Amino acid sequence: MIIASRHDKNMPWILALLALLLLSGCVSQTQRTSTSAPTINDSSGESPSSAYTQLGLAYLERNNLPRAMKALNRALESAPEDAQALQAMAIVYQRQGENALARQYFQQALSAKPNFTQARNNYAAFLYDTGQTAEACRELQQASQDVHYPNRGQLYANLGQCQEALGNIDAARESLQRAQEINPRAPRSYFLLAQLEHQQGNQDRAQTLIAQNIRLAGANRNNLTLARDIAQAQGNQEQVQHYSRLLQSVSP
């Protein structure tokens, strides 16, 4: 799961906001004339809700969940239907193991903004991780229809993995091939399809796919292990020994 963020672009404003928050906590008792939240003035025209959402995402990237939640709560106080803040809060709860709340916030985000493909993909990943595979596939199928989503190839790879888990082999193969058509240089779809073809007994096809994955991703324990297993199924002992030696040189 990837969280798209404008964190780097907004770092100067986020740092300014952090400074403002810190200063607001240091006001002396004699200077306090109001118990209201600090007013945020942004010369760039960004709303307080958006600013707190970006601050929450910055904390989320660092896995500082308490501070992320505090910032996102401030964002939602200002704009209760801010879809970005809602889905970020869903991820906070997901990481905390609060699955019921995570599901609730993902659904609120998609209700507020049905075409929010990033949130739908993250929701599908949550559903898949919690064993709700069929529902995850439905969400990914819907998300994959967004032709403008920059990570659409990844969506199809996710959908193929999901369909394979349900035993829909033909659909999984079609989705993984579609992922390769959309982004021929993304290695994950080649690995997943190589794994599928290996399990289906199509070893020559699997060998071609895993070789392409290794070219794109570099050698690692996962693709070398699969390459060795494919060579073993082909009865190619020379290749089995070759990949076994490579595995010994790769760190766990």
Image (spheres, rainbow, N blue to C red):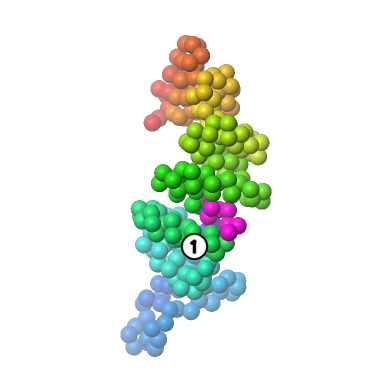
Q: Quadrant of the C terminus?
A: top left
Q: Main secondary structure of the magenta part?
A: helix
What residue sits 58% from the left and 31% below the top?
170
- Left or right: 52 in relation to 67: right
Q: Nearer the viewer, residue 139 or 228?
A: 139
- Left or right: 250 in relation to 181: left
Q: Is residue 21 above or below residue 126?
A: below
Residue 4 at what x, y percent from top left? 54, 53
Task: Say whether residue 182 is magenta.
Answer: no
Q: Which residue is mark 1?
A: 108
Quarter assignment of residue 9: bottom right
Mark 1 secondary-structure assignment: helix
Q: How many marks?
A: 1
Q: Is residue 101 above or below residue 167?
A: below
What residue sits 44% from the left and 28% below the top?
221
Q: Is residue 201 above or below residue 24?
A: above
Q: Which residues are magenta?
A: 114-121
What residue sits 60% from the left and 73% below the top?
45
Q: Nearer the viewer, residue 7 or 30?
A: 7
Q: Amino acid at mark 1?
A: Gln
